[in-house]
Amino acid sequence: MTAGWSHEVVLAATVVSWLIIGLGLAQTVVYLLQLVIAAYALSQRPPVARSALLWDRYGDVAPPIALIVPAYNEEVNIVESVHSMLALEYPNYEVVVVNDGSKDRTLERLIEAFQMVKFERPYEEALAHAPIRSLYASPRTERLFVVDKFNGGKADAQNAGINVCRAPIFCVIDGDSILEADALIRAAQPFIDDPERTVAVGGTIRIANGSRIESGRVTEVRLPRRVLPLFQVVEYLRAFLMARLAWSRINTLMLVSGAFGVFRRAEVVAAGGFTKGSMGEDLDLVIKLHRHMIDSGRRYRIQFIPEPVCWTEAPETLNVLGRQRSRWQRGALECFFRYRSMLFNPRYGRVGFLGFGHILIVDVLGPIAEVLGYMLMPAFWLLGILAADYLLAFTALIFVYGVCVSVCSLILEEAELQRFPRARDLAVLAMAAVLENFGYRQINNLWRVKGWWQYLRADQSWGEMTRTGLGSGK
């Protein structure tokens, strides 16, 4: 510290500086623990079985599954996505597309592509949702149904799909996503191996931008040509392979992605279904399932397994990506404060302490602490209040741990799953894993702080997510 400032000012600056560094250290510890646990979990997993072997082992005992596809303004990708779902390697399933009052030609494209016709089907009104206008079936395939309803939001559409479907297990998947052919039978494994305890399973979400897609299948994995989707590839590796695998290992998984998650229908209905109007409907549902199962005094598992892969289109512009990340932040805050009574509550064990503690450190306090650090630490140094050593320590903390975690996640992915066949792709990803920490990560935190502000203002706007179309090779 430098002389010239009052003792109170220097003390306040010191306290703020150490609070920021302390929160940064807490996040670092969390990420490093996730990395270690994920590495151990991957080392304990058996070798990835071939699809044919899975079919021989599970084909006769696989439970019926309903794929629920909420679709709002998805005319660009919806037909391609449905084609991929109808070609899945699974013995007994149905596809229920829920058109949530789309303003574009989503419904018309489905009707034209699959010759859909209106039909009647009795269904259980187990969960509340906006009124259904019509049900459609396709004479071309008995697997496909379309629910046309008034707009109520994604969670509302998912509840409608749960009511209409008849299978004991359902899979939610975004309308702009493509499942690998064996994704469903891989995701069903825990329900077959441990049917009494398994209530939800999440799979891996991968970025499809740049890859070659033909007839609803990813035929060649390629990296995106644009920098924003490329950085998101690294993010998704870190979020799914490292974080969710680690939390799943200790049965504290708090999020099964709404883009691809498999659930036991009876438990979801008993927990109240998806919360209408929620910005983070996937996080909200998993928390409700944890609470429901613990309150019921039952043993259960909510798992993440890395082998089932769902491909999705990532935002390619700053505006669209910023809206998405701000919305995700609002969803995390909304769920945290809605279920805040579970935080550090002994009744909820590791979910209350570890799961909610993680949300508190990383999602609630993390973005504010980092953005304050970006502004205050250099300002304190320029004003002579903070010594250069403190500033350098903070800067090193930000960048070194970010690079370490990203690169290690990439190493884990390649060592265990080997999804990128070309050495050039690995070199590009390694470079992206380093570069994303210099600018991109900071912008992300600014978007998250914007999400904080929107949450405080009770902003419930979803924002338009512009699609450019899968398979365009960008």
Image (cartoon, helix red, strand yellow):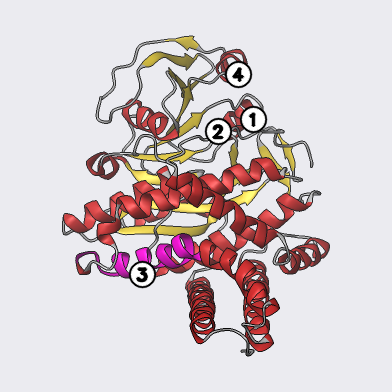
Q: Which residue is mark 2?
A: 175
Magenta: main secondary structure: helix
Toward which corner of the image does residue 428 lie, by quadrant? Answer: bottom right
* Comes first in the chain, label 4 or label 1: 1
Looking at the rendered structure, the kind of residue marked 1 is Asn
The residues bearing labels 4 and 3 have C-alpha atoms spaced at a distance of 43 Å
The residue mark sitting in front, 2 or 4, is: 4
Q: Which residue is mark 4?
A: 104
Residue interval drawn in magenta = 347-366
Q: x, y percentage for residue 269?
A: 26, 39
**Numbered circle sitting on residue 77:** 1
Q: x, y percentage for residue 360?
A: 40, 64
Question: Which residue occupies 61% across, 56% down?
Answer: 446
Q: Which residue is mark 3?
A: 354
Q: Secondary structure at mark 2?
A: loop
Looking at the rendered structure, the kind of residue marked 3 is Leu
